[in-house]
Image (cartoon, coloured by chain):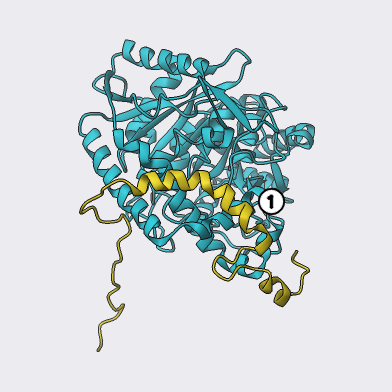
Chain colours: A yellow, B cyan
Amino acid sequence: MSNDDPTEAARRRDPDTLIVTERLDEVRRAYAAIEGQIAMLRSLDLREVHPAVVYRPLKRQKEPS
Amino acid sequence: MTPDEALGAPIADVAAAIRQGRLASADLVAQCLAAIDARDGTLQAFVHLAADAHAQGRRADEAARSGRATGPLHGIPIAVKDNYLTADMTTTAGTSADIAFPNEDGAAITKLREAGAILIGKTRMHEFAWGMETPPTRNPVDQGRVPGGSSGGSGAAVTAGFCLAATGSDTGGSIRIPASLCGNVGFKPTFGRIGRSGIVPHSWSLDHAGPLTRNVADAALLVDIMSGHDPADAGSADEPPTHLVSAIGRGAAGLRVGVCRNHFFEQLDPEVEAAVEATIAGLGRIGVDIVEFAVPELRYGLGAIFAIELASSTAYHLPHLSAGHVDAYRDDVRLLVEMGRLVSGSDYLQAERYRALLAQRFQEVFETVDVVVGPTMPITAWEIGQTEVVLGDRRESVLETSWRFTYPWNLLGSPAISVPCGTDSRGLPIGFQIAASAFDEASVIRAAALVERLR
């Protein structure tokens, strides 16, 4: 499809997912099995557990002279 | 030492023979290229061969003659997975989409070159490391079967004798799975242990670099060479290089071997189970302490790795998705990249919170054991084109089955190795997985060396 007109290609994409409109149902059907596993994870009460992702602010590299 | 003998010897011995003039690197390279010429038309492990491989071998021999050869990999042919950028060879990351990757070396490739390695070529991978089959590569043990993935070209190349070792990357099992299916050793050290600058990302917080080798000593040596802090990798650990070679001969006495009876022993082929149980029994006979335990929270792991891997991969591919490049991806990879758009932000963060919980549980486990062992995979190599497998009373996709025992160690970032422990009745290799606490690669290598000696 890389030869398509980019504007035309963009028009064919679902604006929320960026997935080509005619593929959206197929992608959602394929995702359903995975969605079941993620729903199970969603049911787990993690109380106060912090995500493994932690942001670390960066100090300035050089102190002002 | 003859080139034939070199293909069966530890790299340390082969490199010593080259340095001392007892083996010509050029002859060893010629032997590998002859094997590639003879078999790779069928196996299709390589996507690119270094045009100057012979010349590299001759230069290594000249350096040896003039006393300039000091590296631990001097004159050793190593194959490179095609998601490692290289200054002198094109990188594709397995895609035929119109995406250009820079011609430059990253940290791991720089270290391999500094150690004297001859980078003989680039190995085929499942596109963007998003799959377990690596088509059209075939398994050297049975050419009708898959080599695994995503480092399938590397797994096939090592087993076929096309090189003495190869690099791989592992996001959910992509080093250990081809090692298990092709019958060699695949080692993913701790997350951050080997710098990933110059490796095309798949999922930033899950991607690990590591080697596939013919034996445990080579795996230890390669990690010793490739490890160390990489300032250009945001996930790199500020740790010095490992010294794992010294862990190989530490023996069994006092080693505490954990066996997690839930998750890692569920729904597996009876022949795989028998080989793994026999190996555990063998470890018990030579004096390790066997400790059985369970971690019930593992049942949530599949949802977590899917949420993280899908969301992360799609974030990386977002410009390609927007530009329509993904339409040129393989169907299975395109589908996965598109599915990542359906993972919600809160589900992604729930997965990252679960990951922290699982790390706490295994921190407790590693207070009582040094390593955790079990099967690398529930099955042996499946036939090309096969999509499902029946295990017990359940039919499931081979792709879902293939990574079930490997992905928890990616969520945890722990070091994990696959080492051969036997074959099934069709002669297909069976892998034995050994994992340890973060940054305790020494215990993994110690236990893997014991398993290797049991055979």
The residue that appears at 40% across and 63% down in the rendered structure is: B231
- Residue at 61% x, 69% y is B322
| Residue B381 as seen in the image, left or right of residue B286 | right
Name the residue nearer the viewer: B360 or B296: B296
Q: Mark 1 points at which residue?
A: B330
Q: Give the residue at the far top of this rendering.
A: B285
> Does residue A56 appear left or right of residue B170 in this picture?
left
Which residue corresponds to the image point at 57% horizontal and 23% vertical from the top-left? B390
Judge from the rendering whether residue B344 lies leftward or rightward of residue B9; answer left or right: left
Question: Looking at the rendering, which quadrant does residue B411 occupy?
Answer: top left
Mark 1 closeness class: few <14, some 14–19, many ≥20 residues within 10 Å: some
Q: Which chain carries label 1?
A: B
Residue B83 shows up from this direction: no
The quarter of the picture where the C terminus of chain A appears is: bottom left
Q: In which quarter of the image is the N terminus of chain A?
A: bottom right
Q: In which quarter of the image is residue B5?
A: top right
Location of residue B27 by image quarter? top right
